[in-house]
Image (cartoon, grey):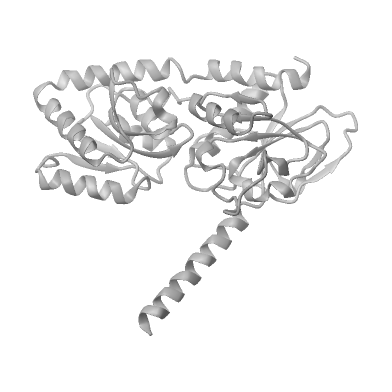
Amino acid sequence: MLPGMSGRVRGIVQATSHARDLRSRRPPALKVGRTRGRTPVVYYLTPDQTSPRGGVRTNYRHVDLLNSMGIEAAVLHTARGFRCTWFDNNTRTVSAAETQLTDDDILVVPEFYSPGLHLLPAATRTVLFNQGAYHTFDYASDLGSRPGAPYTEVANLVCMLTVSDDSAALLAYTFPKIPVHQARPVINRRLFRPRPGSDRRRVGYVPRRRPLERKQLFHVLRARGVLTDWEMMPIEGYSEARTAEIMQGCAIFLSFSEREGFGLPPVEAMASGCYVVGFTGLGGREYFDPEYSVPVADSDLLAFARAVESAMGRYDTEPEYLHKAGLMASDSVLGRYHEQGLRKDLLSVYGPMFGN
């Protein structure tokens, strides 16, 4: 009986967790009224996320830049007075309870709310912001879908917005009738940049990514004696500033990216001067350049282990090689993922909607 009971309990726990997840992904009730002559606003619907998430940080950045460009915008949270505090910001935020949308406004909805798309107001123009293209159908029925689903649930869909070449290609192929635009991610160059003279015999990684594969990799490397005298630095749950500080103190960063729309941790590590080794998550292929990093084929444990051992050995024999590669990586990604570029991207998307 115990094995049966254990399985039943496990099933209940999983079902409860799934139900809780689905509830969190239902958009808040949104009120819609007539225009009444006020200036249209771009509202970025955003989860009330208390722990660091790159997609949420991106929403805040978009709102800041749009307001600086003369296009009114606000982050739309569910709870009254909620604001993300794990990074510095003075972003305009409002709550669903105190906000009335109009049919002239634009509601930007992240893929996080995909299970509740049918609950969105029909009158307001909607932009779907899909930062995780490989997760588009995570909540779709296994019984199949009709053409355009799940985005046929959105009554007044204007276009789709995404963050990488890879995601744009996948979404355009999947939804050929929906215009797809890109808005590049931005690296906070004030924080993520090389720091001269730091203690570099450290390896950074994000522990929540591919935990089983990470465990296997670390066991392989320990079995070979490779990790001796190296400090392994898990990076999770820290503020943006603290994350940057840790990355600046790492010589090597291990990427466990998986099904990523873009993948911020590896690119932020590159900006910080790390030598990055590991999985691209597919979305990261556009910045994983073999000139200054080591992309590893998805799930290839042996190649990953060999690449890490090679990088650590090179640190001992040619420390300047890793240092120069880190500086090259930093110059490359900071030269591409910057606010000026994102400003141009956003103007090309929202400008025509506002007659600009």
Number of marks in the rendered image = 0
In this rendering, position of residue 61 left or right of residue 204: right
Q: Is residue 97 above or below residue 239?
A: below
In this rendering, position of residue 17 left or right of residue 308: right
Q: Quadrant of residue 126?
A: top right
Asked if residue 118 can be seen in this view, the reply is: yes
Asked if residue 79 can be seen in this view, the reply is: no
Q: Is residue 119 above or below residue 231?
A: below
Q: Quadrant of residue 70?
A: top right
Q: Residue at x 28, y 20 (%)?
A: 292
Q: Is residue 115 above or below residue 321?
A: below
Q: Residue at x 38, y 85 (%)?
A: 1
Q: Position of residue 99 (x, y in %)?
A: 77, 43
Q: Position of residue 92 (x, y in %)?
A: 66, 34
In which quadrant will I find the C terminus?
A: top right
Q: Position of residue 296 (x, y in %)?
A: 29, 32
Foreground residue, 191 or 46? 46
Foreground residue, 281 or 92? 281
Q: Residue at x 29, y 47 (%)?
A: 213
Q: Position of residue 287 (x, y in %)?
A: 39, 23
In this rendering, position of residue 242 left or right of residue 24: left
